[in-house]
Amino acid sequence: MGSSTFINEIWRNKKSDIMSFLLQIRAWEYRHLPSIYRIKRPSRPEKAKKLGYKTKQGFIIYRVKIRRGGRKKQVKKGITNGKPKNHGVNEKKFGRNKKSLAEEKAGKFCGNLRVLNSYWINQDSIYKYFEVILVDPFHKNIKRDPNIKWISYPTSKHRELRGLTSSGKKSRGLRKKGHKANKSRPSRRAVWKKNNTVSLPRYR
């Protein structure tokens, strides 16, 4: 077994004395850094490698922190004019998960790079911390690599904003296959449109 297997076992047992202390110290460090921060090497090398990261020029890692919890509707004194159905102010849930938000944040910050994937690294009572793998589509090492050159194509621009990353596909309900995903493929909107559109033959 390689070293990555043992590193993965350590990360899976986060409640051990070593990991709990290490995560606590790192959370303190991350809290005092900017919300989007470039790092030299991944904190979880075995996880990054599994998600497509390679230690060569053209691959970049950014650490992103996202505020935890739901959101609050921005209305003055909690007064929402309208029907009682829309009177909610607190406990507003966003449609996508926090990892998808971290990818979006990094993709907007680095507009010239392409988001490949991301993974969780830490969390505390206020923030969740993710590391986002970004790729430079104009670098010669990326364009010459047959396994990753697809990300330099124009169709791969802002994958994170179109739900094409792993976390984006999860929020779209595309983790399931077969009869369980009849209303999710190709998308919920496309299925709704197909089922609610009357198509009649012209001559009858």
Image: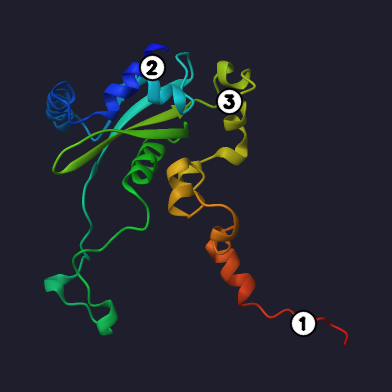
Residue 115, percent from left and from top: 46, 34
Residue at 23% in and 81% down: 81
**Which mark is first along the chain, 1 or 2?**
2
Q: Which residue is mark 2?
A: 4
**Which mark is first along the chain, 3 or 1?**
3
Q: CA distance from mark 2 to mark 1?
A: 59 Å
Q: CA distance from mark 2 to mark 3?
A: 22 Å
**Is residue 23 among the parts visible in the rendering?**
yes
Q: Is residue 161 left or right of residue 204?
A: left
Q: Is residue 187 left or right of residue 92?
A: right
Q: Nearer the viewer, mark 2 or mark 1?
A: 2
Question: Residue farthest to the right?
Answer: 203
Q: Which residue is mark 1?
A: 200
Picture quadrant of residue 126:
top left
State whether residue 65 is above or below residue 182.
above
Q: Is residue 175 left or right of residue 120?
A: right
Decide: few, some or many residues near mark 1? Use Cα within 10 Å; few <14, some 14-19, many ≥20. few
Residue at 44% in and 22% down: 49
User: Disc 1 marks which amino acid?
Assistant: Leu
State whether residue 117 is above or below residue 10.
below
Question: Residue farthest to the front?
Answer: 1
